[in-house]
Image (cartoon, grey):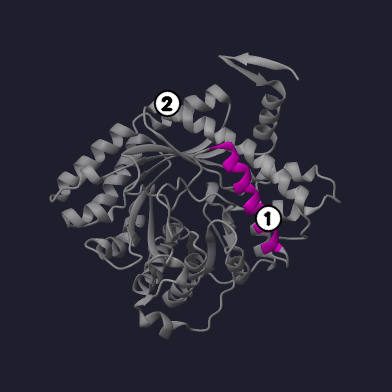
Amino acid sequence: MRKLKVGNNLVNVNDIMETIQMIQEENLDIRTITMGISLLDCCDADIKKSCGKIYDKVCRKAEHLVKTGEEIELKYGIPIVNKRISVTPVAIPLAVSGGNPLEYALTLEKCAGACGVNFIGGYSALVQKGFSAGDKELIESIPEALTVTDHLCSSVNVGSTRAGINMDAVGMMGRIVKRSAELTAGRDCIGAAKLVVFCNAVEDNPFMAGAFHGVGEPDCEINVGVSGPGVVRAALAKLPKDADLTEVADLVKRTAFKITRMGQLVGKEASGMLGVPFGIVDLSLAPTPAVGDSVAHILEEMGLQMCGCHGTTAALALLNDAVKKGGVMASSHVGGLSGAFIPVSEDAGMIDAARCGNLSLEKLEAMTAVCSVGLDMIVLPGDTTPEMISAIIADEAAIGMVNSKTTAVRVIPAIGKKIGDELSFGGLLGAGPVMKVNYTAPDIFIHRGGRIPAPLQSLKN
């Protein structure tokens, strides 16, 4: 086994060559380095002063974020696809200042432009148990905020295992999602693609559109999100067809270990160069529309004829568990969402399965019970009502609440389009067919409002 000395470390040449192959042939990349920045010390009773403090702090902290990412790319030859910022939920400074929430949205957009990042997240509210000052105002402003900005992302947490589900918030979010799509109908409804509704949202998620910087996090930190569906699929393709599922799981674990080690390396390097703490590696398998970079294709490599057929949920459960087990052995700082994402429009295999009708909304909902993170990047018919969207959110939140896991909904009502039509977002967001929905009305249930009580498993103390 030949080794080279790099600094004070001996490096296995075979490991280097394997990593190069993963990058060049199997679409391995670091999906994002995300700098989380606290806005708690930017709160002010004067909204103008608060916005000024936010702009100054974000630009000061993230001034060198993009440059640092590019330097790491050059140093190690590892693609870093996105450089992003997440901030404290904006509903918090809004509660202190009052005023028009759009001033915060425009300030964050200005920050994104000044720092050169791909996205900035945190136009968010946490309302799982009810609304506090600023929450309703911010939520009502989301559609316009996502219309007048290009880089801003928004999220709202409507439920948790400890609190139950705030159905008043769920009812609001159906209308907010629909309005976000309507206001950006001329741009393929992109507003709704930048909005996520959570149950059990986590504070250190580096992935958009749901990233925000939790109040329990440090003042500033670096979180890393890795990718690698293509690497896992390539590894499984070399496995004999008669290998049993225990061997499949073991191979996925070993592959996830290698992918996560790369994320750990990038996170530590960025932390040192920027002089801020290293937070976590989110080891989620994040697909792209590129051929060979699909979670659906991993499931098919396991032996399914096409994603969505019977057996898909079981195969996904195996994959998700093996990814987590391999990743936690590679880093002591695993966090975020960490699993296997199934965003329909961002996954070439999911797109194919949805186009031919093999993958339904109901099957996707079942799959979310065993993976990260929820019903993601799903295009709905333009005539889907706000109540139907709220009901989809409620169903998904219930899965998260009862199973003590993070679930989310990011659906895009395709205004003016029907089943079989398509929306195209471009880039990592991809394109997707309009999927079939159940038009039976849930209106009375949604209009009841109130709270779905927390389940018995919330009583853990």
Query: How many other residues sit within 10 Å of disc 2, few (<14), some (14-19) or many (≥20)?
Result: few
Which segment is the magenta one?
312-331
Identify the image quadrant of residue 423.
Answer: bottom right
Q: Quadrant of the C terminus?
A: bottom left
Q: Is residue 289 visible?
A: yes
Tell me where residue 185 appears, x and y as whole percent: 43, 62
Task: Tell me if 272 is positioned left or right of 9 in this view.
Answer: left
Residue hosting label 2: 272
| SS for dot 2 | helix
Is 430 colored magenta in this rendering? Answer: no
Tell me where residue 168 appears, x and y as whole percent: 34, 74
The one nearer the camera, 113 or 343, is 343
Task: Report the amino acid beneath label 2.
Answer: Gly
Answer above or below: position of 34 versus 90: above
Query: How many other residues sit within 10 Å of disc 1, few (<14), some (14-19) or many (≥20)?
Result: some
Residue hosting label 1: 318
